[in-house]
Image (tube, rainbow, N blue to C red):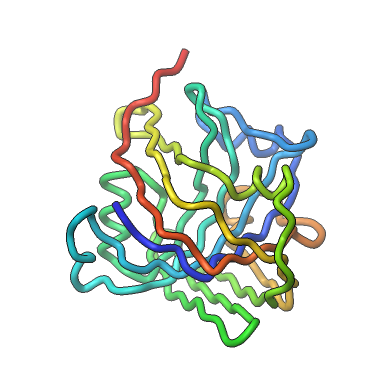
């Protein structure tokens, strides 16, 4: 699949690795930075979703997505593990659940930027509806290209569990993120806790990017011990 992730916001909190590991399947190991696991709440605007060399999927258009994620190692690869992904389009939910076995949810959602302020709102509808999230951040100065920033954003694959219970990996290719520091202006989120995690404590590390063009590869089975 090809797509563009625009106006991406990254909010990350540190977690006890054992807490996150308890939510992962066998042969998927939580990845850590300075002894901590990290959980991200990541809203952005999806644009141009389709297949390489073809026009974007009809009747889909641009739409918001908000995902809850952590970072893992599996089958010798470092990747993203998604706890949930909320969008307001039925077709992407169906395609991603069938093709990539990702936990997409149908939601009422909005994600927009006005000047230097980016706001996001989500109300999950299916499955397990009623979960909400509201986020507003102010865009700040360019972020340093340091080890922690790369750990939280430079991930070139995703891992999921297929119907047979085998782990599957899909490559994610895009240019390096252009990142800015961000200030959290408002945060009232239930998505992280709905994933089975304790509610986040303290202020998150907040980043914003204007976006990247992305190509997500065909899922393949991971060889594991």
The x and y percentages for residue 146 are: 73, 47
The x and y percentages for residue 70 are: 59, 44
Residue beneath the point at 43% across and 75% down: 108
Is residue 169 shown above or below 208?
above
Is residue 212 shown above or below 33?
below
Front-most of residues 200 and 72: 72
Instruction: Using the rendered image of the protein, determine whether residue 26 is visible from the camera's viewpoint.
Output: no
Instruction: Using the rendered image of the protein, determine whether residue 224 is visible from the camera's viewpoint.
Output: yes
Looking at the image, residue 33 sits to the left or right of residue 156; the answer is right
The number of callouts visible is 0
Residue beneath the point at 39% across and 47% down: 102
The x and y percentages for residue 179 are: 63, 61
Is residue 205 shown above or below 70?
below
Front-most of residues 153 and 145: 145
Residue beneath the point at 65% across and 38% down: 20
Residue furthest bottom as drawn: 114
Q: Quadrant of residue 120?
A: bottom right
Is residue 195 shown above or below 35?
below
Residue beneath the point at 58% across and 70% down: 133
The x and y percentages for residue 23 are: 58, 37
Residue furthest right as drawn: 202
Looking at the image, residue 102 sits to the left or right of residue 117; the answer is left
């Amino acid at each position: 699949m090809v797509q563009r992730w625009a106006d991406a916001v990254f909010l990350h909190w540190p977690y006890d690795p054992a807490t996150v590991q308890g939510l992962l399947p066998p042969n998927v190991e939580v990845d850590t930075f300075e002894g901590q696991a990290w959980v991200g709440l990541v809203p952005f605007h999806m644009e141009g979703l389709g297949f390489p060399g073809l026009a974007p999927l009809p009747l889909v258009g641009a739409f918001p997505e908000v995902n809850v994620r952590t970072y893992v190692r599996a089958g010798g690869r470092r990747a993203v593990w998604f706890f949930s992904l909320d969008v307001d389009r039925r077709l992407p939910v169906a395609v991603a659940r069938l093709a990539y076995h990702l936990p997409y949810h149908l939601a009422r959602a909005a994600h927009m930027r006005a000047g230097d302020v980016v706001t996001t709102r989500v109300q999950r509808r299916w499955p397990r509806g009623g979960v909400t999230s509201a986020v507003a951040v102010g865009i700040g100065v360019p972020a340093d290209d340091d080890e922690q920033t790369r750990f939280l954003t430079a991930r070139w694959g995703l891992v999921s569990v297929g119907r047979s219970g085998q782990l599957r990996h899909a490559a994610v290719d895009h240019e390096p993120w252009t990142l800015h520091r961000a200030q959290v202006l408002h945060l009232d989120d239930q998505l992280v806790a709905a994933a089975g995690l304790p509610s986040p404590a303290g202020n998150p590390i907040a980043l914003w990017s204007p976006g990247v063009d992305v190509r997500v590869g065909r899922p393949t089975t991971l060889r594991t011990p």
